[in-house]
Image (cartoon, coloured by chain):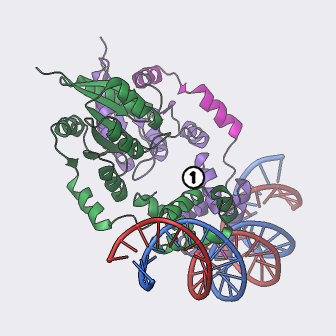
Chain colours: A green, B purple, C blue, D red
Amino acid sequence: MTAPIRVLLAEDQGMMRGALALLLGLEEDIEVVAKVGDGDAIVPAAQDAGPDVALLDIELPGRSGLDAAAELRAALPDCRILILTTFGRPGYLRRAMESGASGFLVKDGPVEELAAAVRRVLRGERVIDPALAAAALSAGPNPLTRREVDVLNAAADGSTVAGIAARLHLSQSTVRNYLSSAIGKTGSRNRMEAVRAARANGWL
Amino acid sequence: MTAPIRVLLAEDQGMMRGALALLLGLEEDIEVVAKVGDGDAIVPAAQDAGPDVALLDIELPGRSGLDAAAELRAALPDCRILILTTFGRPGYLRRAMESGASGFLVKDGPVEELAAAVRRVLRGERVIDPALAAAALSAGPNPLTRREVDVLNAAADGSTVAGIAARLHLSQSTVRNYLSSAIGKTGSRNRMEAVRAARANGWL
DNA sequence: AGATCGGCAGGACAAATGTCATGAGGCCGG
DNA sequence: CCGGCCTCATGACATTTGTCCTGCCGATCT
């Protein structure tokens, strides 16, 4: 028998993290060598543990799993990356692929998929839900500019135009222009809808 | 050895559901007799399987775990209810207790807590994070009226006043009054903040 | 060099939103 | 039976928001 597959697990929910770690550990050929609950801890932990596969959640405290994936790719080129997320948003899948991930799993679907995906990814295969891939392609790329994303993010918590302008060091006019164009691009009628639409597409 | 503890598991995320079921099944004295991913399926499944403990997520498709808890309490008075949720919101805890739950667990914290909580609940103990209980008490009860909650919920997706009024069969003036008072009660400056604040407190 | 795009800003205008005062009816507890 | 609360509704008002147009700058592509 060959050496077990070394897996790094990044997931913020403690119970989920523990459960997945235990499950993967039950597999004969898999060993969880690092468990992390914070996005900023991913790269250091990986450099320390040297995993073969990194299993990354997207929504994490600190930097997101997608951002961490890009850095991990640079720091440990031989480590395969498998994104594991709650939300099968088209933009997430797109960004995951651009960040050099080898696979993209949603947290629905059976647990058995997980170990199977880890093995397939290590073999060099890509693991992507075909329906999700189709959705990502048909949705097209993110139409929002950097600043539009910034402004939507700043607006997401209910800040007023003045507050957003202050936070981003912009004039109120500029903020309203960005908001207006973001609303237009998302086909919405106001910021709330725009934020929701952009979120649903994984554009934030 | 006595008969194993019969557990019903309601959780919408397939991977989480499968992982928890497997983990609980590993315990010698616990048997998962029903797995459910939809709030409306809880009571029927419970009547079918006759569990000793029901482990319920709150955010579910169909009716929420809190609503299901109340019905379950009426249908199977001997079944203990343990709420398992992502969000430790004061209002959730309060409503859980009012619905007759015996315990309230957040999905952070170690997995080992879970089996331990199941056993303790069956023994008649209450399982509640003390810090969370304190927060729930200090936060006080939900200050929003039924209609204010309705209107906030309807506003949460970015609908305009006209849309909300149509959906709730109210006049636009009434909707604006409810919004205004909800904004006042939550200490917010607009609906977005009000929705966020109410959500954070578990008032929706 | 010219065209295009993104970032930034101002002004003017219409529409939506939030506030307030006021008042009707219903229901409950003291 | 009265006071208090909730529901529902108007109208008037100030503020905020969203739209549109104009303009400037720098980067990039052709």
Q: Is residue B157 above or below residue A66?
A: below
Q: Report if residue B54 is visible in the image.
A: no
Q: Position of residue B142 (x, y in %)?
A: 66, 47
Dot 1 surroundings within 10 Å: few (below 14), some, or many (20 or more)?
some
Determine the chain carrying the residue at label 1: B
As for residue B135 lying within the magenta part, the answer is yes
Q: Is residue B36 above or below residue C5?
A: above
Outermost residue toward the top in this view: B1
Q: Position of residue B9 (x, y in %)?
A: 35, 36
Which residue is nearer to you in this view: B74 or D1? Answer: B74
Instruction: Quadrant for residue A48, please give it.
Output: top left
Which residue is nearer to you in this view: A133 or A146? Answer: A146
Identified by mark 1, the residue type is Leu
Q: Position of residue B45 (x, y in %)?
A: 32, 41
Which residue is nearer to you in this view: A103 or A194? Answer: A103
Outermost residue toward the left in this view: A1
Q: Which residues are magenta?
A: B114-143
Q: Give the residue drawn at x 29%, y 51%.
A: A97
Q: Quadrant of the N terminus of chain B?
A: top left
For disc 1, the marked residue is: B204
Q: Report if residue B98 is visible in the image.
A: yes
Q: Secondary structure at mark 1?
A: loop
